[in-house]
Amino acid sequence: MPKITFLPGRITQIVEEGSDILEAAKLAGMSVEAPCGGRGICGKCLVKIESGKVDFDNSGIIPEGIIEDGYVLICRSKATSEDTEIQILSSLDDEAGSFSDAKEDIFNIDKTLLPIDADFMPLVNKLFLKVSQPEAGDGLSDLDRLRKAIDFKKEIDISVGALRKLPEMLREHGGDITITYHSKCDSVKIIDVESSDTSSENYGVAIDIGTTTVAVQLVNLVSGHIIASKTDYNQQIECGLDVISRINYATKPSNLEELRQKVLLTINKSIAELSEGAGITHILNASIAGNTTMVHLLLGIAPEHIRLEPYTPAVYNVPNLSASEIGISIFADSECFIAPSVGSYVGGDITSGLLCTNIPNQTEQISLLIDIGTNGELILGNADFMIGCACSAGPAFEGGGIQYGMRASHGAIERVEVDPVNASATVYTIGNDVPKGICGSGMISLIAELFSKGWIDAAGKLDRTRKSPNIEVVGRVARYKFFPDSNSEMYIDETDIDNIIRAKAAIFSACRIMLQKVHMDFDSLSKVYIAGGFGRYIDIDNAVTIGLLPKLPKDRFVFIGNSSIIGAYMTLISQKHREKEIEISKTITYIDLSTELEYMDQYMAALFIPHTDVELFKDM
């Protein structure tokens, strides 16, 4: 059987002839980005054959000249009878560690919305007790004496693990013990016992499972302080960049389990790094937020019916599950809270995000929440009513489908200034690093600049009639080169621009449909909350210029960052906020845009810069 050697690490994998090279890379433990789920349409899994050969089925995205130089897409390649060396060119690890600190997002939230000390009540709590020592003839077991020491007017149960430890713990310090328990309406279950007073050592993790990234916060549940946080790529990206790709990938039971293990690997790796860094070994609580598909994949539930009519998920409101049932590496018997969903494509990340807004609290004014990502999700309303929908914005804002696109991490071009005379570019990158690519906010900035300076038209076509060293035509497509006088080939072309226009059209048209449902216009909105990591870098003027956001006074826009992780933080430490989120989920009316005939008309009208109806973007 042929041997595949993956470079630069020289990791080898023996495979059978005809085996998928992408599967061989996974078996070898390689992290290869294949955002389109192996369909050969994104070009992100480009590799180079250094020696030997593979059977490559070109989907047409790779030019023949590049193939002749040894480049292929790993997702479209199969092993031949020859031993082969393959150079991996793309990896999720390339940008690891370059995300903004998720701790920062809490500063974007109105302080009055955050839990106060009186609200602190996690799912799992600790209590220090003094238990009497056994006496001859008292007829009491160790568990009987423990129950007598607890002043709860509830039935008290105990796990077998805690019961096994109880005799030794009761006698180690003369009856001074700390119990770890979770409380139901009419019962308490003790899940751990420790000798001495450890009641101040209660820690938990807030987890946001995004389609692209997973954010984890380590929290002191006594003080409510966020100790540390980490954001990393969701390893499921290797199996598809968007939820539909992953739903399709998950149709095989083995693939469904692979997706479950990949997201657990991402979560547990972050938990391990955070707890090790803080010197904490005993994490007792977890609160998890994610869209409907991500929750299904986390739990190993087949998500196929989410995309099939009548679009019915297996579950909206997941009951509390133990960490061991889910597979999260915290104390095994701890209960975990999972944010409730409201529709196939409006999930717990949005109900968590609503906790970070005043939408559920205000009665007179009406506001809009937009979570901009691969799956654009929207909520419109106030305390009296809320309606929600989701639109497929695609991966463009996250860098997917863009030739030199990347996520908003260090080295990404986040802002561009274009010279009106010769179209030359001045670029600004996240972290002031050397430019590696361009992220969504950078694309919006560039397109807005090119449009306002007259270098592209309303259809997103570059001006071929004016001379500029930055603009070149290759076949039927024109491209804009960032650094024409250097060795850099970095550019965006008209196909990239079209992808951004389609993404912004999906979101803006969804907003208009929602407003039509309640017979409102944009100018009636009190606030527009912008959520998602992408929103951290977006410029309002540029977003309005290209038609992504409506023309409103700037003070009506509120950036709330990754509101999903902050909502998870709130529900981690507060019973009040857990109950509120569940109530919020029950009051939202979900609108399925696929059944809205008007949506496609609105979408087509928005496929121009800024829109076919330019009156929408004139000063109020």
Image (spheres, grey):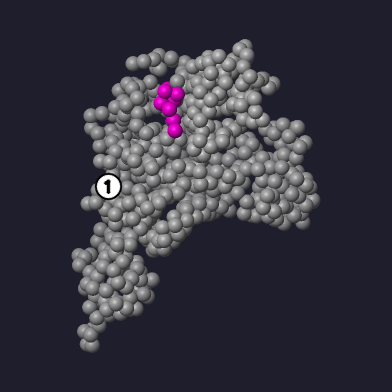
Q: Is residue 104 or residue 285 the one in the foreground?
A: 104
x%, y% of residue 215? Answer: 44, 47
* Relative to 354, 266 lies left or right: right
Drawn side of residue 467 relative to residue 417, left or right: right
Hey, which quadrant is residue 518 in on the image? top left
Tell me the quarter of the picture where residue 205 sits.
bottom left
Front-most of residues 59 and 102 = 102
User: Among all residues in the image, which is located at the extreme top?
Assistant: 465
The quadrant in which residue 66 appears is top right
Q: Determine crowd level at label 1: few under 14, some 14-19, many 20+ residues with C-alpha closer than 10 A.
A: some
Q: Main secondary structure of the magenta part?
A: helix
The residue under the point 49% across, 17% down is: 452
| Quadrant (top left, top right, bottom left, bottom right) of the N terminus | bottom right
Q: In this rendering, does residue 458 appear at all?
A: no
Q: Is residue 355 left or right of residue 329?
A: left
Above or below, 248 relative to 201: above
Say which residue appears at 50% left-offset and 43% top-offset: 98
Quarter containing the C terminus: top left
Q: Nearer the viewer, residue 509 or 175?
A: 175
Give me the residue at 29% from left, 51% from top: 574
What type is the residue that disc 1 sits on?
A: Pro
Disc 1, SS: loop
Q: Which residues are magenta?
A: 537-544
